[in-house]
Image: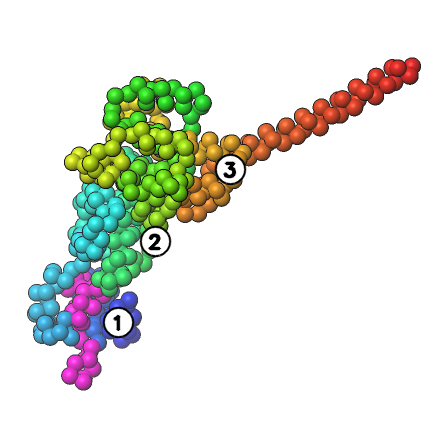
Amino acid sequence: MKRFKTDYPGVFYREAKRIGGKGIEKVFYIVFKKDGKVNEEKVGRQYADDMTAARAARIRGERFEGKIQSRKQIREAKNEIKWTIKKIWDAYKANRLGLKGIITDECRFKKHIAPVLGKKEPSELAPLDIDRIRIKLLKTKKPATVRNVLELLRRIINYGVKKTLCPSLPFKIEMPRVDNLKTEDLTSEQIVTLLKTIDEDVHPVAGDIMKLALFTGMRRGEIFKLKWSDIDYERGFISLLDPKGGVDQKIPLNDATKDLLNSHEKTESRYVFPGRGGRIRTDINKAVNLIKKKAGLPADFRPLHGLRHVYASMLASSGQVDMYTLQKLLTHKGPLMTQRYAHLQDETLKNASEVAGNIINGAIARVSKEIRSLKERNN
């Protein structure tokens, strides 16, 4: 009978008629060396024994350690070595405790993945399983949210493959198309109204946080993590430690920001805008949304991330900042995200071109007028 390779060393299968059913099934074998002798052993059938290549690989490993001695013990150990999506997730999470986003990932897993796929092994997944999750979520969730859920599932499975806990999927997980390049902007009048509303607001930190986002383009998380020790007044820079891009960055400390920080009340906390007990802040939504509402800003305007867009839009439309410099100020990894503001710079260039055209047309008009005047005098 022909041998078929698997993704696991020392594990192969042959095809045989399915027991108690139509069609064929895989019969898994392991090859291992023990006491100087090469052994080949049948470990189970695909359907009759619920055997997979991943399980066979685990059995092979335990054979090396002498933990399993008989087919009976193999059957008894079958459930213990079943690497389900849930079990791989537990291993994945344990290896990433303390990293950014793990709490959000856990919420997505418990809510959207575990109830549907938690008890399944990756080898049991079919494209239809993924389609069902995607279609169900798209009925109530935004494409970006659905993409995040499926991306997490892909990361979990990739982790299992990397740790030889499961084989890779024979198909690609299709992601919903996401158009999240939303660019928010405010008019000069709206900005003036917002700043006036902030000055009239009584919240101790919400207004200053919004101003900092507007003056620097800093992200919400970067503002929450900002410590007094990150501000270099002498050299005129703010250090962004462990930002979204993963690499520490520095942005200029402009005069507006310097005045804001100098007037901001310090506490005993090391954070500029501390949360409860002086610890890192985790939320400010209620207060900034109240300011947004009082200022009469659009309902879909995001108070903090939107102000980051306003900062970028002002610089791009000024005609004084090129796209590379803007990319560095926004701490984008590459130019792609910054290109959303390119049209503003294009508009500035068009206006500049119009100025040139007006100058030329004016010069032509003056020359024509002088020629007409000269002809009239000669006549």
Q: Amino acid at mark 3?
A: Val
Local packing at callout 2 (Cα closer than 10 Å; few below 14, some 14-19, many 20+) is: few
At which x and y percent is residue 197?
33, 20
Q: Mark 2 or mark 3, which has the lower sequence index?
A: 2
* Residue at the limit of the structure toward the bottom, as seen here: 36
Q: Quadrant of the C terminus?
A: top right
* Span of residues in magenta: 32-61
Between tags 1 and 3, which lies in front?
3
For numbered disc 3, what is the local secondary structure? loop
Q: Residue at left 68%, top 27%? A: 359
Q: Residue at left 33%, top 55%? A: 171
At which x and y percent is residue 288?
29, 27
Circle 2 residue:
172
For numbered disc 1, what is the local secondary structure? loop
Local packing at callout 1 (Cα closer than 10 Å; few below 14, some 14-19, many 20+) is: some
Q: Which mark is residue 321?
A: 3
For numbered disc 2, what is the local secondary structure? loop
Q: Amino acid at mark 1?
A: Pro
Residue 361 is left or right of residue 187, and the answer is right
The way the protein has been coloured in the rendering is rainbow
CA–CA distance between discs 1 and 3?
56 Å
Q: Is residue 220 above or below residue 37?
A: above
Q: Quadrant of the N terminus?
A: bottom left
User: Quadrant of residue 271 in the image?
Assistant: top left
Is residue 38 a member of the stretch shown in magenta?
A: yes
- Relative to the observer, which residue lies in front, 217 or 129? 217
Circle 1 residue:
9
Marks 2 and 3 in Cβ contact (< 8 Å):
no
